[in-house]
Amino acid sequence: MTANWSEASEAVRQAKSILIVTHISPDGDAIGSLLGLANGLREMGKQVDAAVDGGVPLFLNYIPGQETVLGELKAGQWDLMVSVDASDEERTGEAGKFGRTHSTQVVNLDHHATNTQFGNFHLVVPEAASASEVVYDWLVYMGHPVSQASATALLTGMVTDTLAFRTSHVIPRTLMVAHDLMAAGAPLFDIINWTMVSRPISDFLLWQRVFPSVKYDDGIVSAVILPDDVKAVGLSDISDAGLVSTLVTADEVMIAIIFKVQEDNTVKLSMRSKVGYDVAQVAFALGGGGHKPAAGATVAGTLDEVWAKVMPMLREVVNRGKLMSG
């Protein structure tokens, strides 16, 4: 994969109106990279719209500029669209679909190795720990000083995608970028508290409902979340409230997976794995994407149908990982 820094920067220079979108069910890196770039481009004098289906999750409403993010996109025309943190076009949802048909050119900014290389210009850097890190590099390349507003957004993306710098893809440069963002005014302590420590009681009530479904079988732990579980605790979206990241920490577990059943006869999968066990290959085969230790996909079918399809694939990953390590 190559990064077209010069071409993408020239496209920004020539554009008067810019749309930025990210992936559906956005996490900290999706919103962090979205707002880090939006804030920076606005500071350059660009007319910028930012959009993601459903808007910004409540736990990220401290990020400067979050109030400008559109939860749906039904009108507009742009010289340039930038997609951030989305491995394929479908992941950008309705906002991305509308944006692509109403924008002259598209920049694809991402850090997923499974990126499908869509768009006119590519800033896809799999070595980066987060899409927010790629945005930081782009702002620096364009010679724009990173403001406190952008730094707060970008450090949020880095913290959440690395689990507070605890994942295997964190390298010395990751911490150097984090240092620069802190020097620009991003409050690391507060960001970790807001995104990694503080939780609403609804998260724990959801876990209480879901824990009876937890199953463990030779390195794989699974759980099922039903739409009624989410509604019962007052949440508005199918979410695991971080449960999959907790389950994978068990000593015996190599892979954790959450089956999130939706009302449209599909099942959302969230997968996490220990080092040496690649769940991205499973997600990609199912039409999703992600990283080796963290990936997801949405699969059509009932829970039983999707379970029967996915679990043998995960078993292969576990067996392959055991062979490699043994």
Image (tube, grey):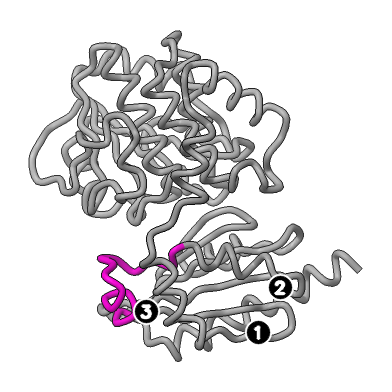
Q: Are marks 2 and 1 in contact (CB under 8 Å)?
A: yes
> Residue 93 occupies which quadrant of the picture?
bottom left
The percent position of residue 53, horizontal first and vertical second, equals 24, 52
Q: Is residue 93 above or below residue 161?
A: below
Which mark, residue 96?
none
Residue 261 bears which disc, if any? 3
Spatial CA distance of label 2 from label 3 is 23 Å
Q: Nearer the viewer, residue 275 or 17?
A: 275
Instruction: Name the residue: 72% across, 78% down.
Output: 219
- SS assignment at label 3: strand
Give, as a three-letter code, the residue at label 1.
Answer: Tyr
- At 43% from the left and 45% from the top, the residue drawn is 28
Mark pair 2, 1: CA separation: 8 Å
Using the numbered discs, state the Cα–Cα distance from disc 1 to disc 3 in whole angstroms. Answer: 19 Å
Looking at the picture, tell me which residue is in the foreground, 182 or 43.
Answer: 182
Instruction: Name which residue type carries label 3.
Output: Val
Tell me which segment is drawn in magenta. Answer: 227-241
Q: Which residue is mark 1?
A: 216
On the image, the x and y values in percent for residue 289 come to 50, 57
Q: Nearer the viewer, mark 1 or mark 3?
A: 1
- Give the answer, above or below, for where 36 lies relative to 28: above
- Marks 2 and 3: which is nearer the front? 2
User: Which quarter of the figure is the N terminus placed in?
Assistant: top right
Asked which quadrant contains residue 324, the reply is bottom right
- Residue tagged 2: 253
